[in-house]
Amino acid sequence: MKDQEPQRNGSFADADLATECSEKLAALTANLAALGVEGLTAAILTDFGQAIAAFQALPTDENMLYTIGISTGKRNTALEAARTALRQVAQPIGRAYGDQSPEYRSLGIGELTRKSVPDTLQLLLTVPAIGAAFVQDPKAVDQGFSETRLTALAPLYAELFKWEGKMHTAETDRTTATRTRVLAYNALNTLCSSLCARGYDHFVEIDAAKAHLFVRNPASAGNGGAGGALPQT
């Protein structure tokens, strides 16, 4: 059974969460002397600041999509180059024997544009061995067939294989990065709420203005321990 992907425990955009946390860190730091009785320390605030910075440093989905796009573009270019080279192998044989002949069909090329990348990679491996039978074939040679057309396939296989792998790696990295960012978001959101609760609870009965500094934005709702709204008077 596939594990469920984690969900964000707030509705902030990522950048907005970092901004709000930075604002709360500044308020907590300014009131550290008073909040010492609530167990707040400079070390705790340092860790909070480091958590904010670490969250901001995580790659965004836009970063990951860019990497996927680059790899996909390179893969597509390599795929088209491979298709072109396979056609250049098949065309002289098709001209010599006809594209419905056993000779032409032996290559297994068919409609290249409908073949998947794995199928195309397979052709790049098998066609050189099959095509070798036509290197000395007078009819094929007369139509322009040569061993050069076969040897051109090996580097194209390497290039297509490389970029197909990079594209899939980039897609996997995106999935991993998304999960990591959501978990970091949840941890930071919860930490911010926990620290704000100390400030709010300390000041709510003695200084409403200062207590208000530690009220979380409504977008933080559902994070388990957010400072609530100020009581109605």
Image (cartoon, grey):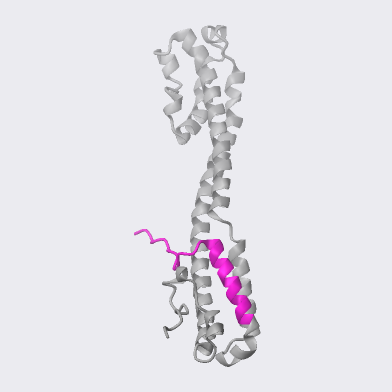
Compared to residue 211, the image places residue 182 above or below, namely above
Q: Nearer the viewer, residue 26 or 5?
A: 26
Is residue 3 covered in magenta? yes
**How far across and down, in percent of the image, does residue 137 sit?**
53, 10
Which residue corresponds to the image point at 58% horizontal and 41% vertical from the top-left?
70
Q: Nearer the viewer, residue 28 or 102?
A: 28
Q: Hey, which quadrant is residue 36 in on the image?
A: bottom right
Which residue corresponds to the image point at 49% horizontal and 13% vertical from the top-left?
93
Is residue 17 covered in magenta? yes
**How far across and down, in percent of the image, does residue 130 sit?**
49, 22
Quarter of the N terminus within the rendering:
bottom left
**How far across and down, in percent of the image, does residue 136 sit?**
56, 12
Q: Residue furthest front?
A: 233
Q: Is residue 107 left or right of residue 195?
A: left
Q: Residue furthest left?
A: 1
Q: Which residues are magenta?
A: 1-29
